[in-house]
Image (cartoon, helix red, strand yellow):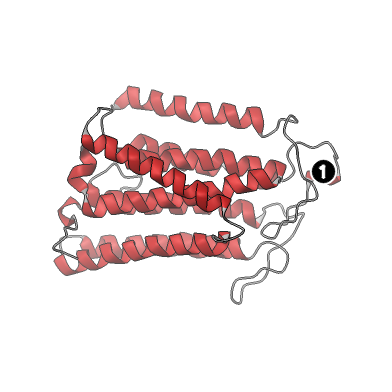
């Protein structure tokens, strides 16, 4: 699928999520919890001025559109099922995170946390596929009942199931911050593996690509961590000040939503570069010649 057909398909998918979002998030048909204990964000609750407010954290709610924008771009660019799953999971995170910050109920928080795990696990699955199984990935680009497609569907279902279970156990086994950092750390290890193999094999423009990728990751990653761990009462990152300011025009948690969506896009783009999948950025050519085989690692 390409051209206008792909644009139409992605537009319909994104339009569906926007309609569901607008039909649920501002709705007063869902219960809210204005007395929620919020350790990671401190936006002034709209219920203080309007006790019947349906959206308790406006900035932290509407900033989730960043996930949908990046998710839509990935859905448009990816040409295999696991890549599309990353884009689709970003769209789900847009919806679930928006519902949580609008309502602040325990149930919505569990769904939000669970889908963060699902999203990160889907990026990890895509990274492994891109680095080690490029030819197999290309066989999942069409909705046919072939073994590669069925395996990819099974992987997607396992990722969703595992993420949901981890979310349900977030208060007993999988503490949200530590688990999220562990999954991000695993992605970082995969990034290092890819970089080492490229450096060993060497090729035209390889060094430039790695340097630019590293700079992009640092440029977006450092502010992402800063906003993530500097919001909420008493939180701070290293020597950076706490950014908790209930009436601030730009909430740190809202900025984190946007930057974390960008970081997922950067991670997707980096691994897409190895598999020859459709990229979000075009600062270098796809490095398909660097596919990592079992002999290389």
- In the image, residue 123 lies at what x, y percent? 39, 50
* Left or right, 24 with reference to 213: right
Q: Quadrant of residue 192?
A: bottom left
* Left or right, 92 with reference to 246: left
* Quarter that holds the C terminus: bottom left
Q: Taking the image as drawn, is residue 17 in sight?
A: yes
Q: Which residue is mark 1?
A: 47
- In the image, residue 118 lies at what x, y percent? 46, 48
For image coordinates 34% across by 40% down, the residue present is: 154
Q: Quadrant of residue 240?
A: bottom right
For image coordinates 49% across by 38% down, the residue present is: 91
In the depicted view, which residue is nearer to us: 87 or 104?
Answer: 104
| Element type at mark 1 | helix
Task: Tally the numbered discs.
Answer: 1
- In the image, residue 181 lies at what x, y percent? 49, 63
Q: Is residue 275 above or below residue 53?
A: below
* Quarter that holds the N terminus: top left
Q: Taking the image as drawn, is residue 283 in sight?
A: no
* Left or right, 109 with reference to 215: right
In the depicted view, which residue is nearer to us: 156 or 58?
Answer: 156
Q: Is residue 41 above or below residue 58?
A: below
In the depicted view, which residue is nearer to us: 160 or 204?
Answer: 160
Q: Is residue 163 above or below residue 173?
A: above
Residue located farthest toward the bottom when viewing the structure as drawn? 239
Q: Quadrant of residue 62?
A: top right
Count residues near mark 1 (Cα–Cα under 10 Å), then give few for <14, some for 14-19, many for 20+: some
- In the image, residue 195 lies at what x, y percent? 27, 65
């Amino acid at each position: 699928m390409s051209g206008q057909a792909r644009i139409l398909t992605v537009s319909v998918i994104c339009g569906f999520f926007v309609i569901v979002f607008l039909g649920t998030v501002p709705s007063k048909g869902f219960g809210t919890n204005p007395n929620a204990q919020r350790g990671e964000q401190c936006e002034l609750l709209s219920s203080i001025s309007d006790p019947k407010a349906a959206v308790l954290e406006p900035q932290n709610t509407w900033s989730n559109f960043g996930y949908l924008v990046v998710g839509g771009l990935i859905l448009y660019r990816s040409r295999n099922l696991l890549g599309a799953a990353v884009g689709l999971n970003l769209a789900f995170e847009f919806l679930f995170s928006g519902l949580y910050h609008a309502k602040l109920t325990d149930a919505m928080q569990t769904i939000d946390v669970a889908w963060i795990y699902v999203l990160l696990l889907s990026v990890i699955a895509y990274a492994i596929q891109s680095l080690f199984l490029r030819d197999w990935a290309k066989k999942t680009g069409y909705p046919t009942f072939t073994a590669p497609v069925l395996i990819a569907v099974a992987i997607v279902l396992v990722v969703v199931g595992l993420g949901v279970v981890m979310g349900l156990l977030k208060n007993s086994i999988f503490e949200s911050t530590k688990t999220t950092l562990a999954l991000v750390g695993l992605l970082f290890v995969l990034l290092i593996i890819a970089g080492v193999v490229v450096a060993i094999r060497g090729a035209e423009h390889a060094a430039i690509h790695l340097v630019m990728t590293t700079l992009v990751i640092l440029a977006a990653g450092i502010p992402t961590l800063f906003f993530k761990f500097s919001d909420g009462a008493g939180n701070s990152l290293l020597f950076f000040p706490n950014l908790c300011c209930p009436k601030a025009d730009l909430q740190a948690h809202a900025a984190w939503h946007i930057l974390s969506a960008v970081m997922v896009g950067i991670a997707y783009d980096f691994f897409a570069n190895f598999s020859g999948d459709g990229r979000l950025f075009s600062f270098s050519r796809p490095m398909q010649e660097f596919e990592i085989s079992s002999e290389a690692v």
